[in-house]
Image (cartoon, rainbow, N blue to C red):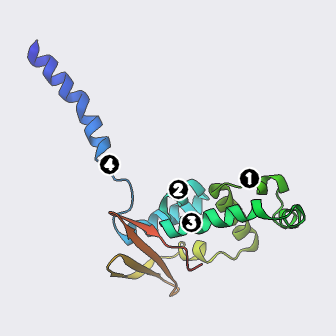
Amino acid sequence: MRLLMKVSWALLLVPLMLSHCAQRGPLTPEEAFHALSRAYHRGDSVALLRLLSRDSLDKVNHAAGMFARMSNEQREIIAGRLEVDPDRLKTLTPAQYLDLQFKLGRRLEEDSVREATSLKIVGSRVEKARAAVRVANGMELFFVKEGPYWKFDMTKF
């Protein structure tokens, strides 16, 4: 009976240990590119936020915050062009900002990251904690290593 109790506890701990060891982010620039591609093509702003470098997150937070600091007139003009409620722009979260970027990119059919993530990787180069992933049309997307994970560096866009 004691042996059965010990074995049952061990069996209960295995899933917990496996979930604790689960990967929390892309371990190579190529994995980061594929995760970025999935997030872009699903329009998944939350997944995209998890893939962004610290500097990129700062850029998104700053851009989202700019709407709150605008005058009501400016916000109404931009809201009209984006086809959203001006009050929504006043309290825009980073995820909502990315959702607007997705919407705008689809509407204008001008989203270079979406285009690049639609293509196959033809090469990559890594220099220390920075990487460039080149796709079939010659465009390069940049990634930085933060801890063990590779993050998308969108500060160049």
Question: Which of the marked residues, 2 or 3, is nearer the chain's N terminus?
Answer: 2
Identify residue type, mark 1. Answer: Thr
According to the picture, the residue beneath numbered tag 4 turns out to be: 22
Residue lying at 41% horizontally and 73% vertically, measured from the top left: 144
Q: Is residue 2 above or below residue 153?
A: above
Residue 83, quarter of picture: bottom right
As measured in the structure, the alpha-carbon distance from the residue carrying label 3 to the one carrying label 4 is: 27 Å
As measured in the structure, the alpha-carbon distance from the residue carrying label 4 to the one carrying label 2 is: 17 Å
Question: Which of the marked residues, 4 or 2, is nearer the chain's N terminus?
Answer: 4
In what element is the residue under mark 4? loop
Which is more foreground, mark 2 or mark 3?
3
In what element is the residue under mark 2? helix
According to the picture, the residue beneath numbered tag 2 turns out to be: 47
Which is more foreground, mark 1 or mark 2?
1
In what element is the residue under mark 3? helix
Identify residue type, mark 4. Answer: Ala
Does the CB distance between marks 1 and 2 fall below 8 Å? no
Question: Which of the marked residues, 1 or 4, is nearer the chain's N terminus?
Answer: 4
- Nearer to me, 51 or 74: 74
According to the picture, the residue beneath numbered tag 3 turns out to be: 58
Question: Mark 4 Cα within 10 Å, few/some/many (few <14, many 20+)?
Answer: few
Question: Which of the marked residues, 3 or 4, is nearer the chain's N terminus?
Answer: 4
Q: Position of residue 132 (x, y in %)?
A: 42, 81
* Residue 132 seen by the camera: yes
Label number found at residue 91: 1
Question: Which of the marked residues, 1 or 2, is nearer the chain's N terminus?
Answer: 2
- Please give left or right for residue 67 compared with residue 102 in the image: right
Question: Mark 3 Cα within 10 Å, few/some/many (few <14, many 20+)?
Answer: some
Identify residue type, mark 2. Answer: Ala
